[in-house]
Image (tube, rainbow, N blue to C red):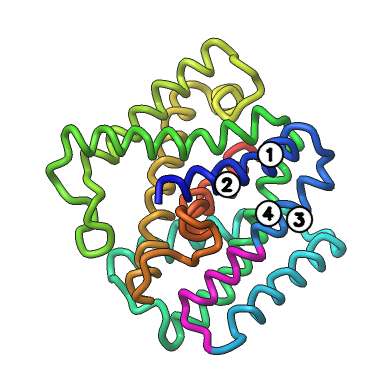
């Protein structure tokens, strides 16, 4: 299992790193487009679309993305729509533990998923346009939150965050992840290391006090995104969103926490 994870990680890095660092934005956008389409396929599977349903859903998402680009729909509009979904529907589903793959909820989530994925694509491409360090710093928010949560949860975890959805997560782990983001974010903002980054941009745009709140909000919604996908998987009766990435699960398993924070972060800086 470890060998499979390592091989998959090496292959992914060999593809993603050169394109992210050196390719023109057009090529980078195409790569992210493929990621989005595969994520949409997994979203359809988790919502229990039958037969070729997940493939058709992925195709519709891809077509919507292409039309969106050609029609010039404002990315800020998509950010606002995606943010509304994560701020309202995400916590509501988690608190109610709603049956997401049934009835009206499924229809709503199929539509909302397309909006979420389009907003994600625009946010990543817009962030890349501001510089490689900027887009990587957005990813770093999630990575730091995950790493901090893992070690704090292992050492201090006592109180379950959402035991019926993701039993391994604790409040202590979540606080550890938040602290890691705040500390590294503050250091990055003070030093201006590889600026512009999301940390320097938030401080410059909002000031230190509101930047602190903004980073805290991003960490909170990274947890919401993670738990929301966990709820989808639990109700679909699967461990991973797919087996597309051997040893790592699926695409959604890797980007679930990014789906909320990408549009929200770009809205904060709009």
From the viewer's perspective, is the residue at label 1 or at label 3 nearer? 1
Question: Distance of mark 4 from mark 2, alpha carbons?
Answer: 9 Å
Quadrant of res 153: top left
3 or 2: tag closer to the N-terminus:
3
Which segment did they paint magenta? 37-50
Question: Distance of mark 3 from mark 2, alpha carbons?
Answer: 16 Å
1 or 4: tag closer to the N-terminus:
4
Residue tagged 2: 262
Question: Distance of mark 1 from mark 4, alpha carbons?
Answer: 10 Å
- Which label belongs to residue 74? 3
4 or 2: tag closer to the N-terminus:
4
Confirm or deny contact between disc 1 and disc 2 (CB under 8 A). Answer: yes
Q: Nearer the viewer, residue 160 or 21?
A: 21
Confirm or deny contact between disc 1 and disc 4 (CB under 8 A). Answer: no
Q: Nearer the viewer, residue 133 or 13?
A: 13
Question: Distance of mark 1 from mark 3, alpha carbons?
Answer: 15 Å
1 or 2: tag closer to the N-terminus:
1
How crowded pointer 3 is (Cα within 10 Å; few <14, some 14-19, many 20+) is rated as few
Q: Is residue 108 above or below residue 113?
A: below
Task: Locate residue 164, reporting x and y percent.
Answer: 21, 64
Question: Distance of mark 3 from mark 4, alpha carbons?
Answer: 13 Å
1 or 3: tag closer to the N-terminus:
3
Element class at badge 4? helix
**What's the residue at 29%, 71% (across, down)?**
97
- Which label belongs to residue 127? 1
């Amino acid at each position: 299992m470890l060998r499979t994870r390592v091989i998959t990680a090496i292959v992914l890095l060999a593809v993603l790193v050169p394109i992210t660092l050196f390719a023109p934005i057009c090529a980078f956008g195409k790569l992210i487009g493929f990621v989005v389409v595969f994520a949409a396929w997994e979203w359809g599977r988790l919502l229990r679309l039958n037969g070729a349903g997940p493939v058709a859903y992925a195709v519709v998402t891809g077509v919507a993305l292409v039309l969106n680009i050609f029609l010039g729909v404002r990315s800020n509009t998509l950010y606002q729509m995606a943010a509304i979904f994560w701020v309202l529907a995400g916590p509501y589903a988690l608190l109610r533990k709603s049956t997401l793959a049934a009835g009206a909820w499924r229809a709503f989530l199929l539509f909302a998923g397309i909006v979420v994925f389009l907003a994600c694509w625009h946010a990543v491409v817009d962030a890349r346009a501001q510089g490689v360090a900027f887009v990587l710093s957005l990813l770093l928010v999630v990575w730091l939150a995950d790493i901090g949560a893992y070690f704090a949860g292992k050492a201090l975890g006592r109180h379950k965050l959402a035991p019926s959805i993701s039993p391994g997560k604790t409040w202590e782990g979540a606080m550890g992840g938040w602290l890691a983001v705040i500390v590294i974010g503050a250091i990055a903002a003070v030093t201006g290391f590889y600026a512009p980054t999301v940390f320097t941009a938030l401080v410059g745009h909002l000031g230190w006090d509101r930047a602190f709140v903004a980073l805290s909000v991003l960490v909170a919604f990274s947890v919401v995104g993670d738990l929301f996908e966990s709820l989808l998987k639990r109700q679909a009766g699967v461990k991973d969103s797919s087996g597309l990435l051997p040893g790592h699960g699926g695409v959604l398993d890797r980007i679930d926490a990014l789906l909320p924070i990408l549009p929200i972060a770009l809205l904060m800086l709009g």
